[in-house]
Image: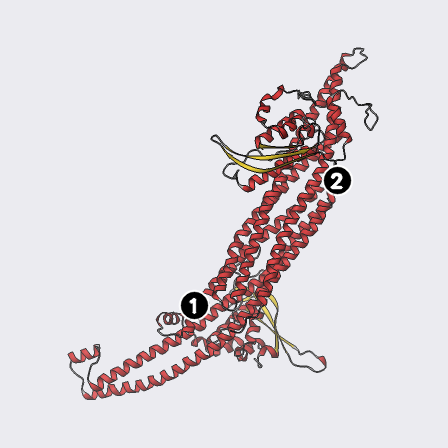
Amino acid sequence: QDLSLPNGTPVDTSSPASSSSLLNRLQLDDDLDVETRDLFVTVDDPKKHVCTMETYITYRVTTKTTRAEFDLPEYSVRRRYQDFDWLRNKLEESQPTHLIPPLPEKFVVKGVVDRFSEEFVETRRKALDKFLKRITDHPVLSFNEHFNVFLTAKDLNAYKKQGMALLSKVGESVKYVTGGYKLRSRPLEFAAIGDYLDTFSLKLGTIDRIAQRIIKEQLEYLVELREYGPVYSTWGGLEVELSEPLEGVSACIGNCCTALEELSEDMTEDFLPVLREYILYAESMKNVLKKRDQVQAEYEAKLEAVALKKEDRPKVPTDVEKCQDRVECFNADLKADMERWQNNKRQDFRQLLMGMADKNIQYYEKCLTAWESIIPLLQDKPETK
Amino acid sequence: MEDCLAKKMEITVSEAEKRTGRNAMNIQETYTAYLIETRAVEPQSEGQCAPVDSLWRRYSEFELLRNYLSVTYPHIVVPPLPEKRADFVWHKLSADNMDPDFVERRRIGLENFLLRVASHPVLCQDKIFYSFLTQEGGWKEMVNETGFQLKADSRLKALNATFRVKNPDKRFTELKHYSDELQSVISHLLRVRARVADRLYGVYKVHGNYGRVFSEWSAIEKEMGDGLQSAGHHMDVYAASIDDILEEEEHYADQLKEYLFYAEALRAVCRKHELMQYDLEMAAQDLTSKKQQCEELATGTVRTFSLKGMTSKLFGQETPEQREAKIKVLEEQIQEGEEQLKSKNLEGRDFVKSAWADIERFKEQKNHDLKEALISYAVMQISMCKKGIQVWTNAKECFSKM
């Protein structure tokens, strides 16, 4: 096949990395309809396992697919966090030119967070589900061998032990040497991405702090409200005609307390984790940018070395050619991934922020209902005794 | 109620002004003076408005008026004055008496006090009250001339009576108990409400920080930028809205405070009853012992042990003449005592009757006012919720355009 880039340059299809990159470049439209999708992955059903040495949680990973790369149309396996962590590391190793989605934080401070509480497990499950779905949606990562094994293997540990011995069809990409070369000039677009990610992380960090502060203030407000409501009830006990109205106000405040509690919980469980995920995402993306810089620097160094030799060579040596290849592939993969990432980010934040607004609306609606319902009670004229 | 002053005269406390002057000890001081405006509510010819009379009074004069009314009408639950010093404040409000917000709320409270007195069927007819509203000069002297301070019961006397009275009217005992509890519960409520206001303020204000960070973030975004920026603006609106909300709530707190202070007035009426009852009991006791003495002297028998009886037995009897003289004195005292007892009894019964009538009037007023206050509080909460829904709906729309 005679493939060429949109600008006319012919593409070297011999290197395995570039063929998948091509697929990547051509498939920029990632609004995949459900009908055209051929791989569905879900994480659910957390279960606690108590063993002599340790206690841990596993999650069920269900796969439904029509892809040829899978032997069966359906799979159901159980995986624990360290399996996901292994997968992510493998992806970073084997697909260094791509942006790998983040995992929820590995370590939690013992004693502060209960690793086995329903809320924590559910938050983690959602994050792990999102992690796999992001990989599933990626035109290159979703075809990764390790990903396939993760989704299908009955005994993942056995596979893990095999390690480097396994040969893959797609092929392990060449290890990119970070040889400490100095970069001459970073292409503007990658410099821009770097700057963007820096500011982006900063702003998300600020939003995280603000959201935490709001939750803290809300909980302190809740503490006072919980004392406030019952005082009306106590007063009601002293009165005759005002007894019902005062009780009504007390109950109303109680309902508002419940609504507020729900709001704070939702923000803690749904809002903050997603923010933190994106901060981690930005961090790992910056690392990929650094690797790209290294690859470019290596190429430039080797090219310069050749130019200095001043030999009358008609051809550029193959290893320099390979370097050039790597640079171009890296740039292309990264560009495509960045575009995809930007689009997903926009959708994710749109959903996240709309969700936050929604939760606040629901909180106020619950309170509104409570207060509106006691107006008739307050206005009620008691029957003459 | 038909002759109520409030119906015949429009009363307002329309202004407050800072003044400096020299006080009784010739020391320079700053105080606030309040302008009382009155106007007759009478049908005027050809749509003419009645002229407005006005005079300035300071808080201490209001206090003097109230003290006079409390002493002169002890059977009436006298309306309370707004607080002298700012209490139950949450952090944003100033506890400074000179703070304009405090002065403003006090102005409203003083107007409310005057209206309460003017609509009271008994108090509104008082001449001193009328002069307070209409006569600028010489009013203080007029009040002092009534000599009401002399009529005031000492605190010690009142406390003594509370402990020692044997048969107070049960209704008053219960009412005193109620007023104590009411005072306690409203104080608690006001304290917690102030803390709630404080915390709520914090929640709203922190949201303002979103405004700035969204704006900064929007600067680096292409498609998301506009949505973020406009949502940030709504967060600023949200944060700013709490100031008006909490200011409105202060009116609710003031309504509760009035009844907190009313509890004190209620208790004062109960204490007056106890004092009168104790007085009565003491007078009756005194009369009984005098009658007994008289009987003993007349019959020569000592029915119960008395020191006088013993000493006279030990140190010899008196002469018949001495005895006759003593009996006569006692008989006079007994007659006086019986008349006094009769009038005290009458006084006591009258007091109970009129006090209880005013208490019933007060109860109805209280129930009506507090119900209204609770309704207005609920309405405030509803308004706050609706504002919240509006702001977040606007923000959600901005986010949807991201």
Label 2 with label 1: CB-CB less than 8 Å: no
Q: Which quarter shows the N terminus of chain B?
A: bottom right
Relative to A128, does residue A318 appear above or below in the rendering? above
- Which quarter of the figure has residue A31? top right
Please state the horizontal and vertical placement of residue B53, each as a whole percent of the image.
63, 76
Please state the horizontal and vertical placement of residue B192, each as a whole percent of the image.
52, 57
Which residue is under mark 2? B222
Which residue is under mark 1? B177
Image-based side of A304 in relation to A82, left or right: right
Image-based side of B172 in relation to A330, left or right: left
Relative to B10, does residue B210 appear above or below in the rendering? above
Q: Tell me the residue at 58%/22% (across/down).
A: A161
In front here: A136 or A110?
A136
In front here: B159 or B19?
B159
Please state the horizontal and vertical placement of residue B182, each as a whole percent of the image.
47, 65
Which secondary structure, mark 1? helix
